[in-house]
């Protein structure tokens, strides 16, 4: 069966904007998040407290985050290490996310660490965050395929998932960073995780849409009991450290499918499309989302 309700974890302002060639002005980012909050989305990833030289697009996190403090939504932020956590806590963040990799190649490219070194880096982050009652998400990238290593063995993914949960993460987000997964792989990984004792209620899915499989993969995950789905308004997104990564599953495409299935998300699709059209004008190119195009005659 399918769930009655799905929580959308909106990543457009973080995953989307981290990958833009041109840096988006802080005021435009703030307006983007404000408009997203006005669509009924309740979890809107706002930015990352990473090294500004690694991700210059999000170097304005200190300016942006306080501008959002009046919004009645959750605003998680990415923190790779204690320095990032310090910066986020100083601004009152109540939800943070660490981000691991299932493969050594991407751990090196994204975090300058081995997989185990990055887990060691996250350990004090999670412990301190939990000590302050801050919610911690653990991302796991390259759960299905890796641009350098090819297909990723399921046990390798399960090991890092377990490690993130053992650190104390409240939820995990399983990332198809480069968008190569197909639904059979999704079912196989979720089955293996369940067999390894990971509760499906702790799992979210994060599909990039490179091969147009993100919606099919999402449906496979819903059939396995997943109720948290990451997506980005207008299908923005990608990762500057993973060649061939393209945009995330578009939130509009997701909402269209869920609405058709009678699954509640609380999101006003018309307002969301208008937000993505507005953002596309700022970025100077149309949204890649089929639903945005269909509903806006772009
Ligand atoms: P490093 O070069 O190894 O850093 O980078 P370090 O630990 O050696 O520190 C070097 C200097 O950086 C120090 O300064 C630190 O204070 C400073 P110094 O003492 O030399 O003057 N520094 C910082 N400054 C500000 N904020 C910080 C910070 N940390 C250290 N947080 C590091 C290691 C982790 C910092 C770097 O690799 C990094 O920032 N990586 C972030 C990469 C990133 O943001 N990638 C995109 C997000 S992940 C993603 O998109 C995938 C996802 O969507 C899921 C999916 O699709 O699969 C989540
Ligand atoms: Mg991503």
Image (cartoon, helix red, strand yellow):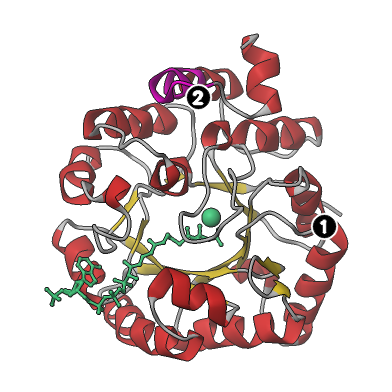
Q: In the picture, residue 73 is in which quadrant?
A: top left
Quadrant in which the N terminus is drawn: bottom right
Q: Is residue 148 above or below residue 5?
A: below
- Residue depicted at x 65% and y 9%: 297
Where disc 2 sits, the SS reads helix
Q: Residues within 10 Å of mark 2 (few under 14, many from 20)?
A: many
Write down the region rendered in magenta. 277-285
**Mark number displayed over residue 182:** 1
Quadrant of picture, ligand 1: bottom left
Q: Is residue 179 above or below residue 69?
A: below
Secondary structure character of the magenta stretch overall = helix
Where disc 1 sits, the SS reads loop
**Mark number displayed over residue 276:** 2
First reached walking from the N terminus: tag 2 or tag 1: 1
In front of the other: 263 or 249? 249
Q: CA distance from mark 2 to mark 1?
A: 27 Å
- Residue depicted at x 60% and y 70%: 202
Q: Is residue 96 above or below residue 12?
A: below
**Mark number displayed over residue 174:** none
Q: Position of residue 239 (x, y in %)?
A: 49, 54
How many labels sit on residues?
2
- Outermost residue, top side: 297
Q: Position of residue 199 (x, y in %)?
A: 67, 76
In front of the other: 215 or 42? 215
- Residue depicted at x 44% and y 21%: 284
Q: Is residue 137 magenta?
A: no
Quadrant in which the C terminus is drawn: top right
Q: Position of residue 26 (x, y in %)?
A: 23, 35
| Disc 2: residue Cβ within 8 A of ligand 2's nearest atom | no
The answer to the question of whether label 2 and label 1 lie on touching residues, with beta carbons closer than 8 A, is: no
In front of the other: 17 or 75? 17
Looking at the image, residue 78 sits to the left or right of residue 230; the answer is left
């Amino acid at each position: 069966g399918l769930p009655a309700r799905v929580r959308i974890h909106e990543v457009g302002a973080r995953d989307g904007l981290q990958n833009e060639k041109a840096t988006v002005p802080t005021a435009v980012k703030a307006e983007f998040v404000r408009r997203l909050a006005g669509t009924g989305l309740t979890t809107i990833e706002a930015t990352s407290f990473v090294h500004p030289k690694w991700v210059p697009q999000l170097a304005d996190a200190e300016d942006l985050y306080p501008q959002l403090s009046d919004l009645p939504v959750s605003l998680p932020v990415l923190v790779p290490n204690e320095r990032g956590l310090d910066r986020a806590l100083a601004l009152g963040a109540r939800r943070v996310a660490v981000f691991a990799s299932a493969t050594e190649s991407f751990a090196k490219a994204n975090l300058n660490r081995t997989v185990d070194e990055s887990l060691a880096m996250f350990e004090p982050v999670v412990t301190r965050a939990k000590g302050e009652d801050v919610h911690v998400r653990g991302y796991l990238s390259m759960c299905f395929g890796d641009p350098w290593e090819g297909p990723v063995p399921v046990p390798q993914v399960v090991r890092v998932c377990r490690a993130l949960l053992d650190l104390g993460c409240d939820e995990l987000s399983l990332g198809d960073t480069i968008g190569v997964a197909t639904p059979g792989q999704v079912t196989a990984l979720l089955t293996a995780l369940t067999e390894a004792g990971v509760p499906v209620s702790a799992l979210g899915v994060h599909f990039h849409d490179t091969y147009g499989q993100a919606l099919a993969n999402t449906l496979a995950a819903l059939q396995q009991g997943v109720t948290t789905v990451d997506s980005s308004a207008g299908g923005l997104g990608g990762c500057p450290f993973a060649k061939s990564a393209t945009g995330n599953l578009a939130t509009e495409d997701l909402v269209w499918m869920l609405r058709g299935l009678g699954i509640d998300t609380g999101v006003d699709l018309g307002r969301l499309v208008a937000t993505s059209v507005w953002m596309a004008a700022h970025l100077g190119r149309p949204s890649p989302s089929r639903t945005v195009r269909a509903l806006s005659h772009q």
